[in-house]
Image (cartoon, helix red, strand yellow):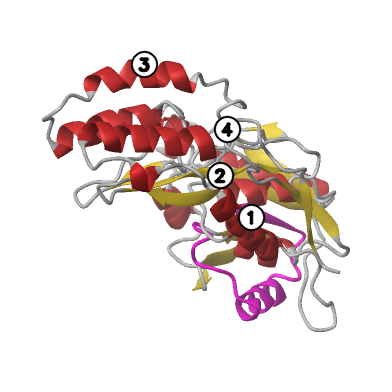
Amino acid sequence: MKCKLPLIITALVAALAMTSCHSVDEAPDSPEGNFDALWNIIDRQYCFLDHKGIDWDAVYAKYRPQVKPGINVLQLYTVCAAMLDELQDGHVNLTTPFATSYYKKWWSDYPQNYNERLVDEYYLKFGGLTRGGFTYAILNDSIAYVRYPSFAAGASDTTLDWMLMLLRDCKGMVFDIRDNGGGSIAAVETIVSRFIDRRICAGYIQHKTGPGHSDFSEPYAYYFDPVDPEKHFSWLKPVVVLTNRSTFSAANNFASVMRLLPQVTQMGDRTGGGCGMPFSSEIPCGWSVRFSSSPVYDAEMQLTEFGVDPHIHVDLDPEKALQGIDTMLDAALTFLEEKSK
């Protein structure tokens, strides 16, 4: 039976609901009660405390004294957001009626390595075809360029068929997911299915089985199948996947799957990571917390929470960018041209 990732995710969510034994509803709706409820949710359900070597008890000791009776909601939010930042996870958010916390250092301390205007003006000439979240064109007469800025856009079979049909005579493809912050895991499977001609193990996933930091199920493998070649267009020629530190979540997962295919080379910078399946809970005052609950591994059982290293590291040269040159895209085009000789 085909093991589809969406079915696994549904099962994991159900498992999380059954194992979610934190007593949030029993905590008082006070500054102290809300802080303790938030700390307990992460303590029992967050999946990377041991992976990241985080002493969560020490974090409690650091921040709990800052929560004093009578502090206002903004002060409480500030303390809680700072505590969550200790997880160093872009999937962790605290949402209130007035703000949502967001950890940015997974990308903010690194070069951006992407300039949308640079590509649009000097490579696409403000042209290209755009449909269903994709922008694509033929560069250097023989290399397909596909820009996919968000997996939240989804990916329809109709759009993919037209795009691959129009690009079919190209010798290679640059698939640019720089600055792609993620979105739908289902879109990852839909797109990857166009680059394979056999069933592949795309990775493994676990779920929490108890409140302990290392209470996890055995890893479940999940698989991707190719499209029917009699009904849909595929691409089995050389591909370069371009990544940067702002390649995150579902885009990080896409890179981790694609880079293991024989015709694919990942170039650019290390991805931003974010491999935990998000889950949400609530504290007594009604604020919601979103966090990573289920770790996802690649097909080699490597955890990709911390990002995926490229096969070939290339940075965007700021000085050459001023001259209209994207050194990362140029490196990918040259690589594919050489490969096609």
Alpha carbon separation for disc pair 1 and 3:
32 Å
Label 4 secondary element: loop
Q: In this view, does 7 lie above or below 121?
A: below
| Residue in the foreground of this view, choosing between 329 and 215 | 215
Residue on which disc 3 sits:
61
Name the amino acid, label 2: Ser
Q: Is residue 117 left or right of residue 97?
A: right
Work out how far the residue at label 4 is from the one at label 3, CA to CA, in angstroms.
Answer: 19 Å
Numbered disc 2: secondary structure: strand
Disc 4 to disc 2: CB gap under 8 Å? no
Q: Find the residue positioned furthest to the bottom.
A: 231
Q: What's the amino acid at mark 4?
A: Phe
Marker count (numbered) = 4
Q: Which residue is drawn at 83% across and 77% down?
A: 228
Q: Name the residue under label 4.
A: 48
Tell me which amino acid carries mark 1: Leu
Q: Start and end of the magenta stretch?
A: 149-176
Task: Confirm or deny contact between disc 2 and disc 1 (CB under 8 A).
Answer: yes
Amino acid type, callout 3: Ala
